[in-house]
Amino acid sequence: MSVLRLAIPSPLRRLFDYLPPRDMNGSEAAGLQPGLRLSVPFGRRKVTGYLVEVCEDSDLPLAKLKHADALLDTVPLVPPTLLQLCDWAARYYHHPAAEVLGAAFPRPLREGKPHQPAGNPGWRLTTRGMGLPVGGLPRSPRQAEALALLQTAPAVSNARFRECGISAAVLRELCSKELVEKCTLAEAPMVPSSNPGLTLNREQAAVLSALLGVREGFSCHLLEGVTGAGKTEVYLQLITDCLARGRQALVLIPEIGLTPQTLDRFRARFNASIVVLHSGLGEAERYRSWEAARDGSAHIVIGTRSAVFTPLRAPGLIIVDEEHDGSYKQQDGFRYSARDVAVKRGQLEDVPVLLGSATPSLESLHNVGTGRYQLHRLRQRAGASALPTIAAVDLRRQALQAGLSGPLLTAIEHRLAAGQQVLLFLNRRGYAPTLQCHDCGWVAECRACDARLTVHRRPACLRCHHCGATHAIPRQCPDCHGASLMAAGLGTEQTEDFLRHRFGQWPIFRVDSDSMQGRHAMGELVAKINQGQPGILLGTQMLTKGHHFPAVGLVAVIDADAMLFSADFRGEERMAQLLTQVAGRAGRAGVPGEVMLQTHYPDHPAVQAMLNVEYGDQARAMLLNRQAAGMPPAGQLMIVRSDCSDPAYGEKFLQTLRDRVALPPGARLIGPLPSPMQRRAGKFRCQLILLAPDRRTVQLATGALVAQAEVMPARHGLKWSVDVDPQDLY
Ligand code: ADP
Ligand code: ZN
Ligand code: ZN
């Protein structure tokens, strides 16, 4: 008797056994392929399960097993390599297999809808129709035209018939004579081609030729190239080669809405089918893109994090741009790193993987050090532009207007007068981070989080940036009823107000998640900025991500101090990456660039490093410190988090877990401790941190902790999660 072992959407990290559907005979059942979807009863629900394997027997008595209701696919919809990838990810991240597999399917298929090939609907000749001579059907000119068209290709799409002015009615008449039949055209007939690229400089050419030398088989490469070095040009030329070999390229980028230029560059270079996958897509569009990637009609798949799980018919190359970017890590639910999954995928698909960044993560530099990745460097900017000069502005005892010092204001004026653009970086949206009573010191705090409320002016309200709660701005202090409430600290809205007042004759663009609502907002803004008129761009880190703004001559960091005193062990790395990326927006097209860092601590080592040491050397020094401290990427981390309406219960749960699990040698637990922001959206959060010298030990320890946690009762709405390779310790 065949038993079907399925992954079922459930919080449990185990598989479930079913008997085959009642209408299926034994040999059919034995031949079922992994990856097939089945509809099965689960508790009182009907759910979609994924076949993992067909077994001879079950650990449970067969009489206890339920029958699956129905087989949903005739062939597995995703290739075996992708199933292996999901299996690996479920094990590595200790996440329920069905949810991981779900990442490889669009929602309608996860929900058990039948698979419809997205191929073009069309018509082809029947055997009888093929017997007709060229110039047949002369008595009916419309039908004759249709026939003539069908005699030029194996099949013709409905769209093509419409273009030629042939109506569906004509085809139906031919169909009734059994001369034509309906079909789908599986693959786009398009043959991809590329427009000529730029003539590479010496460094770029060397990198490209090294990468072309390893185009077959798996290998992993880090392209460390300063901002504006022409990494994208290298990607494009590598993809040209990939397409010429009839293979597909998968390109991951951090955020598509923020970087419409990247897409434009791809579209301008290739006459090929490029599909885009990101969370902003409508369901139908997403499904079509997925299907095109799957059936091979898409030549280039560009997507954000989750696109790493897109099925590909003939992958040839995987690129992860801005590989250091934090958005590659999913921070809730299935907590995976798309960069790391991409590397694993390259290994399983046996294709090269290229990670690129001006500010590589310490993880990737570590992997270069251990020989897992090959390093390629671009040390110079492409074309004519040089790297910008960087200077600190000592803010001590300086008069500030909306956070801007005299020297900075003068520099802004000069640049505007010279017809250039200025980019001001302030990583705090809203008007002010705090509302305070000048009489008694009361501060507006969120009721649900351990956090202050941010003052917003447009629209006027107090908002929590952690749970989204919004309140009206009080007229008087709720504690002392005084009327001296004041907004303390600086946010982008406030600086914008000042800039409009002071530089009213120039356009001012504010770029943060409040001002950039809607899918096209960023694209429209980037288009305006790239007209090159002088003006000021003011924004949060949204402005720093990979943009190429040719007219920007001056970049200023309004509050560099905000980043100096991070408690997180990655704080220094993040600051160096962010500042280098911000600085990299300056002087990208010939205009000599200048960067000003406003700080009260010009002698702080991190500020000095920014001024005097290039990112690559800073990062390598930080890596040595991490290695000495046994912290990632040298040591490994995992966090078990609890989230509970009762603060004591969450901590007790983790304590019990800790007490009950015997750890493998070398593993060490810290905690349970309240998270740095303990209360968020009304829930109390605690964490247990696992430190281990290597991944194998993390895997063993995490397996033991998860197995124990799964059998422990969880009251008070307690939810727990595991985070392997966490990005943040909160
Ligand atoms: P990165 O991706 O490394 O930040 P880009 O690929 O965006 O750099 O290149 C920066 C600028 O330099 C772009 O305007 C690009 O067109 C230009 N560029 C890149 N390579 C060359 C080259 N070989 N010759 C001239 N200009 C180049
Ligand atoms: Zn008060
Ligand atoms: Zn809140």
Image: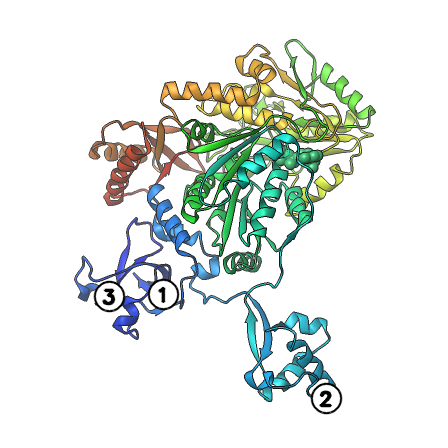
Q: Residues within 10 Å of mark 3 (few under 14, many from 20)?
A: many
- Residue 276 visible from this viewpoint: no
Q: Nearer the viewer, mark 1 or mark 2?
A: 2
214 left or right of 68?
A: right
Q: Is residue 134 above or below residue 548?
A: below
Precedes in sequence: disc 1 or disc 2: 1
Question: Label 2 amino acid?
Answer: Pro
**Label placed on residue 138:** 2
- Confirm or deny contact between disc 2 and disc 3 (CB under 8 A): no
**Label placed on residue 39:** 1
**At x 55% / y 19%, what residue is drawn?**
440
Q: Which scheme is used to colour this image of the protein?
A: rainbow
Q: Residues within 10 Å of mark 2 (few under 14, many from 20)?
A: few
The quarter of the picture where residue 53 lies is: bottom left
Residue 56 percent location from the top left of the image: 21, 62
Question: Label 3 amino acid?
Answer: Ser
Using the numbered discs, state the Cα–Cα distance from disc 1 to disc 2 in whole angstroms: 52 Å
Precedes in sequence: disc 2 or disc 3: 3
